[in-house]
Amino acid sequence: MLLPPANWLPQAPLELLQLDWLTNAGIEVAILRLDRIDPLISGNKWFKLVEHLKAADRAGAQGIISLGGAHSNHLHALAAAGKRLGFETVGLLRGHPQQTPTVEDLQAFGMQLHWLGYGGYRARHEPGFWEPWQAQFPNLHAVPEGGGGLAGALGCKVLKQQVSSQLSTLGWSDYHGWWLACGTGTTLAGLVLAEAGAHPVYGALAVPEDHGVAPQVAAIMQEAGVAAAGYERLDASRGGFAKVDEQLLEFIEITERGSGIPLEPLYTGKALLALKERIEAGGFESDTRLIFVHTGGLQGRRGFISCS
Ligand SMILES: *Cc1c(COP(=O)(O)O)cnc(C)c1O
């Protein structure tokens, strides 16, 4: 039994974001706090896992095997879910054994870890990659890196309902669109599917354009049988994935102080800074109301800050 109990539906709080540059522009932003869905599980990676868990359950699996790096938000959410909901988890890690805060949590959550080295990890897209692992763990269901694909996107559709059901608490009746950080574009694809053109989705790319977000979103839409419409990509990577500069760090510090909302520099900090830049360039009219998705990632920040 892998499915979370039916009554276990983590709700992401929706809060008004109070920042000078928004007030000055006459723009309202509500932040959907995926970083606050549960004491153990955090971020968009939980939502990306839901449909994979359902598939595992249908297949009669007893747990999940997946892969990621030593700071992986995906493996962290998976291990936390396994601990929280009581199923087995195995993580295949990139590189050689190292103790990061993330790895310590994975172990504490009871995830079994296997280090693949770098070459071994690079082979993850090769046809025979899963065979030996499936032989070793016949009762586990394999989930691709990051929980992507159509299954990952479908699990994110529920975010629209979570927003709709809380709009009135802000005194809002509607919103113009969504703004969120993208790595693979899976979460964005889920929102685009949920909206079906009703509201635009703006994807702030935390990775350079050549990382394939556009084709990945297109592939998900094609698999879902709908046209990839109603979304816009913009480069928010600031020179590359995980590249961090002084202006970004200062922005995060000022934002945390002003709003009380914690951000990390890889995704959420870059996405919000890109929104500020868009607004300052006149990209949105005053009275615009936007939903900013806090995609989580705060656990990964511990390792990042200590090694930078
Ligand atoms: C993985 C991740 C993203 C990117 O999600 P995609 O669905 O891959 O686009 C954004 N923010 C955080 C904090 C993440 O961990």
Image (cartoon, helix red, strand yellow):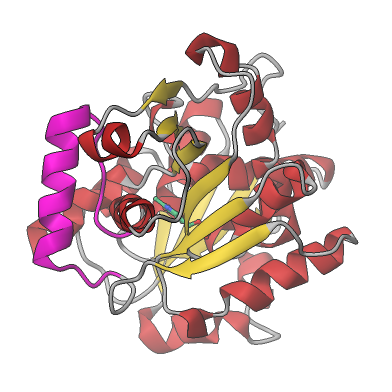
Comparing 39 with 142, the one in front is: 39
Q: Residue at coordinates 61% horizontally, 82% vertically from top-left?
A: 125
Comparing 244 with 129, the one in front is: 244
Comparing 308 with 56, the one in front is: 308
> Farthest residue in the right direction?
225
* Number of callouts: 0
Q: Residue at coordinates 55% horizontally, 67% vertically from top-left?
A: 233
Seen in the image, is 2 located left or right of residue 213?
A: right
Seen in the image, is 134 located left or right of residue 243?
A: right
Quadrant location of residue 2? top right
Quadrant occupied by the C terminus: bottom left
Comparing 66 with 261, the one in front is: 261
Q: Is residue 63 above or below residue 5?
A: below
Residue 260, how many percent across, how many down? 20, 27
The answer to whether any part of residue 260 appears in the image is yes
Seen in the image, is 273 located left or right of residue 66?
A: left
Q: Is residue 179 above or below residue 87?
A: below
Magenta-drawn stretch contains 21? no
Q: Is residue 235 above or below residue 201?
A: below
Residue 83, how many percent across, how many down? 46, 32
Quadrant occupied by the N terminus: top right
The answer to whether any part of residue 72 appears in the image is no
Q: Residue at coordinates 67% horizontally, 77% vertically from top-left?
A: 215
Q: Residue at coordinates 41% horizontally, 22% vertically from top-left?
A: 15
Residue 253, how many percent across, how many down? 11, 44
Residue segment shown in magenta: 242-266
Q: Is residue 286 above or below residue 6?
A: below
Residue 108, how many percent across, how many down? 31, 39
Magenta-drawn stretch contains 259? yes
Quadrant location of residue 123? bottom right
